[in-house]
Every structure is written in C-alpha cells, then in structure tokens.
Image (tube, rainbow, N blue to C red):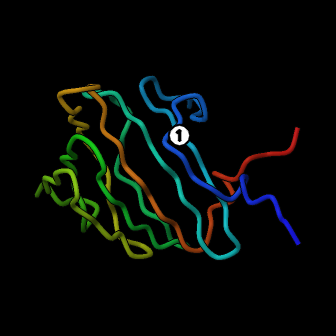
Amino acid sequence: MNQDFSNLLFFFDDDSFDETDRPGFRRRVMDGEQTQLCFWRIDGGAKGSYMHKHDDHEQLGIIFRGALDFRIGEEDTQERSYLNTGDVYVAPKGVWHGDSIFIGDAELDECWILDIFSPPRDDLRKKDD
C-alpha cells in the first residue's frame, strides 16, 4: 500500500513560511498529536519579543542559524543568556522567557529557531478556511 507522506515532511522551503503580525517574523508550524514544531525565520534585529510564559506547554528551542540573546528564569530576571547556532534551551511550563535580541547570520541576516511545544498550542494551529 502506497501512502502519500509529503504533508508530514518538514522542509526549509522559504515559500512555506507565513508572515506574522510582527514585522520580520515568519513561521511554519507542523502539528503532531502530542508535539508541535514551530520553525521561525526572524530577521536579524527584529523587534517584538516580550517576557512571557506558557502555563500549559513545555517549550524546547534549537538555534539553527544566527544567534539569540534573551532572558529566561524569573519574570524580573535581568540576566541574559546568549545562544549560538546549535545551542538549545528549555523553557519548562511556567518559566518566564523572552525579551529576545535576534542576531542574524552572515549569509541571510536571519535567526532560525525551531521551537518544539508539548502539548501543541492551539493558538499556533492552522485554522481551516
């Protein structure tokens, strides 16, 4: 039995990313039953990140291109963490994170981040038209 799995594959296809309401932020979301992938392509220097937390979702992020300078921990922490390409962060449920500075790479001036959420976030799921 041949099945078409093309809709289950994830590609780094520029045309498959959607613009968001934040200038310089594009994303592609893939939903699984228990896990969700949110791949971000963010312009270097883009603004729009704020401190937030997810009370019902664990978040793990992997930096694929560029770098990320952000805060993680208590809501009022001033300590910043700097992550390079290949680095990973974990924001367990209820942990504050954000206030990010996105550093673009030399080739595209973009920061690529893969966020993994468990369970999936309803606000990121694609809506049926």
Which residue is under mark 1?
Answer: 27
Query: Looking at the rendering, in which quadrant would you find the C terminus?
Result: top right
Q: Quadrant of residue 66?
A: top left
Residue at 11% over, 58% down:
79
**In front of the other: 72 or 28:** 28
Q: Position of residue 77 (x, y in %)?
A: 18, 60
- Closer to us: 26 or 52: 26
Question: Can you give x and y, in whole percent of width and height, for residue 5 in the image?
Answer: 74, 60
**Which of the 4 quarters of the picture holds residue 17?**
top right
Who's the residue at 34% across and 51% down the image? 51
Residue displayed at 48% across by 48% down: 39
User: Is residue 43 left or right of 9 when viewed as pictured?
Assistant: left
Residue most extreme to the front: 1
Amino acid on which disc 1 is placed: Arg
Q: Is residue 114 left or right of residue 126?
A: left
Query: On screen, 119 above or below 99?
Result: below
Residue 6 drawn at (x, y percent): 72, 53
Q: At 62% from the left edge and 66% from the top edge, which residue is drawn?
A: 120
Residue 8 left/right relative to 22: right
Describe residue 105's horizontal placement relative to residue 43 as left or right.
Answer: left
Instruction: From this view, report whether residue 56 is shown above or below residue 46.
Output: below
Under tag 1, what secondary structure? strand
Residue 12 in the image, given as x and y percentages of width and height:
48, 42
Q: Quadrant of residue 97?
A: bottom left
In the rendered image, the vertical position of residue 67 relative to residue 44, given as above or below: below
Q: Decide which of 86, 91 is in the foreground and name it.
A: 86
Q: Is residue 5 above or below residue 105?
A: below
Q: Quadrant of the N terminus?
A: bottom right
